[in-house]
Amino acid sequence: MGFDENIEMCGELVVHEDTLENIRANMLKDHIVNDLAEFFKLFGDATRLRILYALSLSEMCVCDISEFLDMSQSAVSHQLKVLRQCRLVKYRREGRNVFYSLDDEHIQQIIHIGLEHMNERQADGY
Amino acid sequence: MGFDENIEMCGELVVHEDTLENIRANMLKDHIVNDLAEFFKLFGDATRLRILYALSLSEMCVCDISEFLDMSQSAVSHQLKVLRQCRLVKYRREGRNVFYSLDDEHIQQIIHIGLEHMNERQADGY
DNA sequence: TATTCATATGAACATATATTCATATTTTAA
DNA sequence: TTAAAATATGAATATATGTTCATATGAATA
Protein backbone atom coordinates (compact mmCIF):
# COMPACT_ATOMS: atom_id res chain seq x y z
CA MET A 1 0.00 0.00 0.00
CA GLY A 2 1.54 3.21 -1.21
CA PHE A 3 4.86 1.44 -0.96
CA ASP A 4 7.54 3.60 -2.42
CA GLU A 5 5.14 6.12 -3.95
CA ASN A 6 6.59 9.52 -3.30
CA ILE A 7 3.39 11.46 -3.54
CA GLU A 8 3.96 15.17 -3.80
CA MET A 9 2.22 17.56 -1.45
CA CYS A 10 2.92 21.03 -0.21
CA GLY A 11 6.03 20.72 -2.32
CA GLU A 12 7.15 17.75 -0.24
CA LEU A 13 5.92 14.35 0.88
CA VAL A 14 2.45 13.69 2.11
CA VAL A 15 2.11 14.03 5.82
CA HIS A 16 -0.05 11.04 6.64
CA GLU A 17 -0.10 8.54 3.83
CA ASP A 18 -1.80 5.84 5.91
CA THR A 19 -4.67 8.15 6.76
CA LEU A 20 -5.10 9.00 3.11
CA GLU A 21 -5.10 5.35 2.10
CA ASN A 22 -7.84 4.61 4.59
CA ILE A 23 -9.95 7.55 3.55
CA ARG A 24 -9.53 6.93 -0.14
CA ALA A 25 -10.65 3.34 0.40
CA ASN A 26 -13.78 4.34 2.30
CA MET A 27 -14.78 7.53 0.55
CA LEU A 28 -18.14 7.94 -1.13
CA LYS A 29 -18.12 7.91 -4.89
CA ASP A 30 -18.10 11.27 -6.61
CA HIS A 31 -21.57 11.08 -8.06
CA ILE A 32 -22.98 10.18 -4.67
CA VAL A 33 -21.29 13.11 -2.99
CA ASN A 34 -22.57 15.38 -5.71
CA ASP A 35 -26.13 14.15 -5.42
CA LEU A 36 -25.98 14.35 -1.65
CA ALA A 37 -24.73 17.92 -1.80
CA GLU A 38 -27.60 18.82 -4.12
CA PHE A 39 -29.95 17.22 -1.65
CA PHE A 40 -28.62 19.11 1.36
CA LYS A 41 -28.47 22.34 -0.59
CA LEU A 42 -32.24 22.33 -0.47
CA PHE A 43 -32.18 22.64 3.31
CA GLY A 44 -29.76 25.52 3.09
CA ASP A 45 -32.18 28.27 2.23
CA ALA A 46 -34.49 29.90 4.75
CA THR A 47 -37.46 30.00 2.40
CA ARG A 48 -37.24 26.32 1.53
CA LEU A 49 -36.59 25.38 5.14
CA ARG A 50 -39.72 27.27 6.19
CA ILE A 51 -41.68 25.42 3.56
CA LEU A 52 -40.30 22.07 4.66
CA TYR A 53 -40.95 22.73 8.31
CA ALA A 54 -44.46 23.97 7.62
CA LEU A 55 -45.17 20.86 5.57
CA SER A 56 -43.97 18.75 8.46
CA LEU A 57 -46.90 20.23 10.38
CA SER A 58 -49.53 19.89 7.68
CA GLU A 59 -49.97 19.52 3.96
CA MET A 60 -50.56 22.84 2.24
CA CYS A 61 -51.63 24.17 -1.11
CA VAL A 62 -49.43 26.67 -2.94
CA CYS A 63 -51.81 29.43 -2.06
CA ASP A 64 -51.51 28.68 1.68
CA ILE A 65 -47.74 28.51 1.55
CA SER A 66 -47.55 31.76 -0.35
CA GLU A 67 -49.79 33.45 2.21
CA PHE A 68 -47.93 31.91 5.13
CA LEU A 69 -44.51 32.99 3.90
CA ASP A 70 -45.82 36.33 2.69
CA MET A 71 -44.09 35.72 -0.61
CA SER A 72 -45.17 35.83 -4.22
CA GLN A 73 -46.88 32.76 -5.62
CA SER A 74 -44.20 32.62 -8.30
CA ALA A 75 -41.30 32.52 -5.87
CA VAL A 76 -43.03 29.76 -3.92
CA SER A 77 -43.79 27.75 -7.04
CA HIS A 78 -40.17 27.97 -8.15
CA GLN A 79 -39.00 26.60 -4.83
CA LEU A 80 -41.62 23.88 -4.80
CA LYS A 81 -40.48 22.83 -8.22
CA VAL A 82 -36.95 22.28 -6.96
CA LEU A 83 -38.16 20.46 -3.87
CA ARG A 84 -40.34 18.29 -6.07
CA GLN A 85 -37.57 17.46 -8.50
CA CYS A 86 -35.31 16.28 -5.70
CA ARG A 87 -38.10 14.29 -4.10
CA LEU A 88 -38.28 16.21 -0.86
CA VAL A 89 -41.96 16.87 -1.32
CA LYS A 90 -44.82 15.16 -3.10
CA TYR A 91 -48.11 16.68 -4.25
CA ARG A 92 -51.64 15.85 -5.14
CA ARG A 93 -54.14 17.82 -7.14
CA GLU A 94 -57.57 18.62 -5.73
CA GLY A 95 -59.63 20.71 -8.07
CA ARG A 96 -57.79 23.91 -8.71
CA ASN A 97 -55.47 23.45 -5.75
CA VAL A 98 -52.26 21.47 -5.55
CA PHE A 99 -51.44 20.18 -2.09
CA TYR A 100 -47.84 19.61 -1.12
CA SER A 101 -46.51 17.41 1.67
CA LEU A 102 -43.16 15.99 2.73
CA ASP A 103 -42.01 13.02 0.72
CA ASP A 104 -40.90 10.93 3.70
CA GLU A 105 -39.70 10.79 7.29
CA HIS A 106 -36.08 11.58 6.51
CA ILE A 107 -36.82 15.21 5.86
CA GLN A 108 -38.17 15.80 9.33
CA GLN A 109 -35.43 13.71 10.88
CA ILE A 110 -32.73 15.81 9.29
CA ILE A 111 -34.32 19.05 10.41
CA HIS A 112 -34.71 17.62 13.89
CA ILE A 113 -31.07 16.65 14.20
CA GLY A 114 -30.05 20.05 12.92
CA LEU A 115 -32.12 21.72 15.62
CA GLU A 116 -30.64 19.36 18.18
CA HIS A 117 -27.14 20.26 17.09
CA MET A 118 -27.84 23.95 17.41
CA ASN A 119 -29.45 23.39 20.80
CA GLU A 120 -26.39 21.70 22.19
CA ARG A 121 -23.99 24.29 20.78
CA GLN A 122 -25.72 27.40 21.94
CA ALA A 123 -27.89 27.77 25.01
CA ASP A 124 -29.98 30.06 22.92
CA GLY A 125 -33.53 28.91 23.36
CA TYR A 126 -34.14 26.75 20.31
CA MET B 1 -59.50 32.55 16.01
CA GLY B 2 -59.38 34.39 12.75
CA PHE B 3 -63.05 35.18 13.36
CA ASP B 4 -64.29 37.56 10.76
CA GLU B 5 -60.84 38.42 9.44
CA ASN B 6 -61.14 38.50 5.69
CA ILE B 7 -57.52 37.86 4.94
CA GLU B 8 -56.59 38.64 1.36
CA MET B 9 -54.81 36.11 -0.79
CA CYS B 10 -54.56 35.40 -4.49
CA GLY B 11 -56.83 38.37 -4.81
CA GLU B 12 -59.47 36.57 -2.78
CA LEU B 13 -59.91 34.81 0.51
CA VAL B 14 -57.38 32.45 2.00
CA VAL B 15 -58.03 28.87 1.11
CA HIS B 16 -57.35 27.18 4.42
CA GLU B 17 -57.36 29.57 7.33
CA ASP B 18 -57.38 26.82 9.95
CA THR B 19 -54.26 25.24 8.49
CA LEU B 20 -52.51 28.59 8.55
CA GLU B 21 -53.48 29.21 12.18
CA ASN B 22 -52.02 25.87 13.17
CA ILE B 23 -48.82 26.36 11.25
CA ARG B 24 -48.33 29.91 12.45
CA ALA B 25 -48.72 28.71 16.01
CA ASN B 26 -46.13 25.97 15.66
CA MET B 27 -43.62 27.54 13.31
CA LEU B 28 -39.99 27.99 14.27
CA LYS B 29 -38.90 31.51 15.04
CA ASP B 30 -37.26 33.43 12.22
CA HIS B 31 -33.79 33.57 13.73
CA ILE B 32 -33.84 29.84 14.29
CA VAL B 33 -34.84 29.11 10.73
CA ASN B 34 -32.12 31.42 9.52
CA ASP B 35 -29.45 29.82 11.68
CA LEU B 36 -30.62 26.37 10.69
CA ALA B 37 -30.47 27.27 7.01
CA GLU B 38 -26.92 28.54 7.47
CA PHE B 39 -26.09 25.29 9.18
CA PHE B 40 -27.50 23.09 6.43
CA LYS B 41 -25.97 25.26 3.75
CA LEU B 42 -22.63 23.85 4.84
CA PHE B 43 -23.69 20.36 3.79
CA GLY B 44 -24.81 21.65 0.43
CA ASP B 45 -21.44 21.89 -1.27
CA ALA B 46 -19.58 18.88 -2.63
CA THR B 47 -16.19 20.07 -1.38
CA ARG B 48 -17.39 20.62 2.16
CA LEU B 49 -19.37 17.40 2.12
CA ARG B 50 -16.24 15.50 1.07
CA ILE B 51 -14.34 17.13 3.89
CA LEU B 52 -17.04 16.28 6.40
CA TYR B 53 -17.31 12.70 5.25
CA ALA B 54 -13.55 12.25 5.25
CA LEU B 55 -13.38 13.64 8.77
CA SER B 56 -16.03 11.15 9.82
CA LEU B 57 -13.49 8.48 8.94
CA SER B 58 -10.46 10.07 10.54
CA GLU B 59 -9.07 13.35 11.74
CA MET B 60 -6.90 15.04 9.15
CA CYS B 61 -4.52 17.93 8.86
CA VAL B 62 -5.07 20.62 6.25
CA CYS B 63 -2.27 19.20 4.18
CA ASP B 64 -3.91 15.78 4.06
CA ILE B 65 -7.29 17.19 3.15
CA SER B 66 -5.79 19.31 0.44
CA GLU B 67 -3.97 16.31 -1.00
CA PHE B 68 -7.01 14.07 -0.68
CA LEU B 69 -9.33 16.50 -2.45
CA ASP B 70 -6.68 17.49 -4.94
CA MET B 71 -7.45 21.09 -4.22
CA SER B 72 -5.38 24.11 -3.31
CA GLN B 73 -4.48 24.55 0.33
CA SER B 74 -6.09 27.95 0.22
CA ALA B 75 -9.45 26.69 -1.00
CA VAL B 76 -9.43 24.03 1.69
CA SER B 77 -8.52 26.50 4.41
CA HIS B 78 -11.33 28.80 3.38
CA GLN B 79 -13.82 25.99 3.65
CA LEU B 80 -12.43 24.80 6.96
CA LYS B 81 -12.78 28.30 8.29
CA VAL B 82 -16.50 28.28 7.53
CA LEU B 83 -16.97 24.82 8.97
CA ARG B 84 -15.09 25.93 12.08
CA GLN B 85 -17.12 29.08 12.53
CA CYS B 86 -20.37 27.15 12.42
CA ARG B 87 -19.03 24.51 14.76
CA LEU B 88 -19.19 21.59 12.39
CA VAL B 89 -15.54 20.81 12.94
CA LYS B 90 -13.03 21.33 15.71
CA TYR B 91 -9.26 21.40 15.47
CA ARG B 92 -6.10 20.92 17.44
CA ARG B 93 -2.61 22.10 16.71
CA GLU B 94 0.30 19.67 16.68
CA GLY B 95 3.53 21.34 15.74
CA ARG B 96 3.15 22.86 12.33
CA ASN B 97 0.05 20.85 11.55
CA VAL B 98 -3.54 21.61 12.44
CA PHE B 99 -5.74 18.55 12.74
CA TYR B 100 -9.43 18.83 12.04
CA SER B 101 -12.19 16.50 13.16
CA LEU B 102 -15.98 16.54 13.31
CA ASP B 103 -17.41 18.53 16.15
CA ASP B 104 -20.01 15.97 17.22
CA GLU B 105 -22.19 13.02 16.27
CA HIS B 106 -24.92 15.07 14.63
CA ILE B 107 -22.83 15.74 11.58
CA GLN B 108 -22.45 12.07 10.73
CA GLN B 109 -26.07 11.39 11.59
CA ILE B 110 -27.29 14.00 9.15
CA ILE B 111 -25.10 12.68 6.36
CA HIS B 112 -26.26 9.16 7.12
CA ILE B 113 -29.92 10.04 6.91
CA GLY B 114 -29.28 11.90 3.69
CA LEU B 115 -27.68 8.81 2.19
CA GLU B 116 -30.55 6.70 3.46
CA HIS B 117 -33.05 8.99 1.80
CA MET B 118 -31.25 8.78 -1.50
CA ASN B 119 -30.99 5.02 -1.18
CA GLU B 120 -34.71 4.62 -0.78
CA ARG B 121 -35.53 6.97 -3.64
CA GLN B 122 -33.26 5.58 -6.28
CA ALA B 123 -32.09 2.00 -6.62
CA ASP B 124 -28.86 3.47 -7.77
CA GLY B 125 -26.18 1.76 -5.77
CA TYR B 126 -25.48 4.21 -2.98
C1' DT C 1 -67.01 28.06 -24.82
C1' DA C 2 -65.33 31.98 -22.45
C1' DT C 3 -63.71 33.44 -18.19
C1' DT C 4 -61.62 33.10 -13.86
C1' DC C 5 -58.79 31.06 -10.42
C1' DA C 6 -54.66 28.35 -8.93
C1' DT C 7 -50.39 27.00 -10.26
C1' DA C 8 -46.24 26.64 -13.27
C1' DT C 9 -42.43 28.43 -15.85
C1' DG C 10 -38.94 31.16 -18.80
C1' DA C 11 -36.00 35.16 -18.82
C1' DA C 12 -33.70 38.76 -16.46
C1' DC C 13 -31.46 40.66 -12.59
C1' DA C 14 -29.31 41.12 -8.26
C1' DT C 15 -26.98 38.79 -4.70
C1' DA C 16 -24.39 35.02 -2.70
C1' DT C 17 -20.60 32.02 -2.84
C1' DA C 18 -16.44 28.98 -4.19
C1' DT C 19 -11.97 29.31 -5.92
C1' DT C 20 -7.70 31.68 -7.11
C1' DC C 21 -3.87 34.64 -6.25
C1' DA C 22 -1.01 37.07 -3.35
C1' DT C 23 0.43 37.52 1.10
C1' DA C 24 0.30 37.19 6.21
C1' DT C 25 0.88 34.37 10.40
C1' DT C 26 2.71 30.82 13.21
C1' DT C 27 5.74 27.13 14.28
C1' DT C 28 9.90 24.46 13.72
C1' DA C 29 14.53 23.69 12.14
C1' DA C 30 19.05 25.54 10.73
C1' DT D 1 17.56 35.06 14.23
C1' DT D 2 16.84 33.51 9.58
C1' DA D 3 14.73 30.45 6.62
C1' DA D 4 11.33 27.16 5.54
C1' DA D 5 6.98 24.71 6.20
C1' DA D 6 1.97 24.57 7.31
C1' DT D 7 -1.92 27.17 7.67
C1' DA D 8 -4.86 31.40 7.42
C1' DT D 9 -6.86 35.29 5.15
C1' DG D 10 -8.17 39.51 2.14
C1' DA D 11 -9.40 40.90 -2.44
C1' DA D 12 -10.92 39.75 -6.92
C1' DT D 13 -13.43 36.99 -10.11
C1' DA D 14 -16.44 33.78 -12.04
C1' DT D 15 -20.38 31.12 -11.28
C1' DA D 16 -24.58 29.74 -8.87
C1' DT D 17 -28.90 30.92 -7.09
C1' DG D 18 -33.33 33.31 -5.33
C1' DT D 19 -36.71 36.53 -6.60
C1' DT D 20 -39.38 39.28 -9.78
C1' DC D 21 -42.02 40.06 -13.88
C1' DA D 22 -44.59 38.54 -17.57
C1' DT D 23 -46.96 34.93 -19.29
C1' DA D 24 -48.47 30.11 -19.98
C1' DT D 25 -51.12 26.05 -18.52
C1' DG D 26 -54.87 23.52 -16.52
C1' DA D 27 -59.12 23.06 -13.97
C1' DA D 28 -63.60 24.86 -12.57
C1' DT D 29 -67.55 27.80 -13.27
C1' DA D 30 -70.73 30.89 -15.68
Image (spheres, coloured by chain):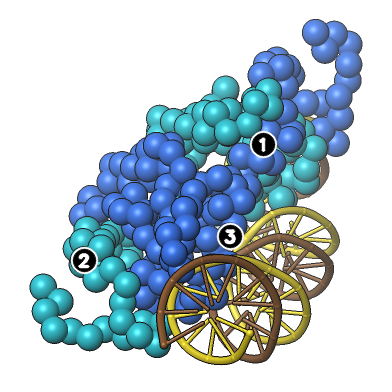
Chain colours: A blue, B cyan, C yellow, D brown
At label 3, counting other C-alpha atoms closer than 10 Å, the crowd grade (few under 14, some 14-19, many 20 or more) is: few
| The N terminus of chain B: image quadrant | bottom left
Which chain is mark 1 on?
A
Q: Of the numbered discs in the image, which one, if any, rests on residue A33?
A: 1
Position in image of residue B36 (x %, y %):
40, 54
> Do discs 3 and 1 belong to a common subunit?
yes
* Left/right of residue B27 with respect to residue A5 in the rendered view: left
Front-most of residues B22 and B93: B22
Give the residue drawn at x 36%, y 75%.
A67
Marks 3/1: CA distance? 22 Å
| Chain ID at mark 3 | A
Which residue corresponds to the image point at 26% horizontal and 83% vertical from the top-left?
B7
Question: What amino acid type is highlighted by mark number 2?
Answer: Asp
Nearer the observer: mark 3 or 1; the answer is 3
What percent of the width, then of the height, locates residue D11?
71, 75
Q: Give the CA separation, mark 2 to mark 1.
A: 41 Å
Task: Give the residue number, with chain letter if any, for mark 2.
Answer: B18
Left or right of residue B19: residue A104: right
- Is the Cβ of the residue at disc 2 closer than 8 Å to that at disc 1? no
| Label 2 secondary element | helix
Q: Which mark is residue B29?
A: none
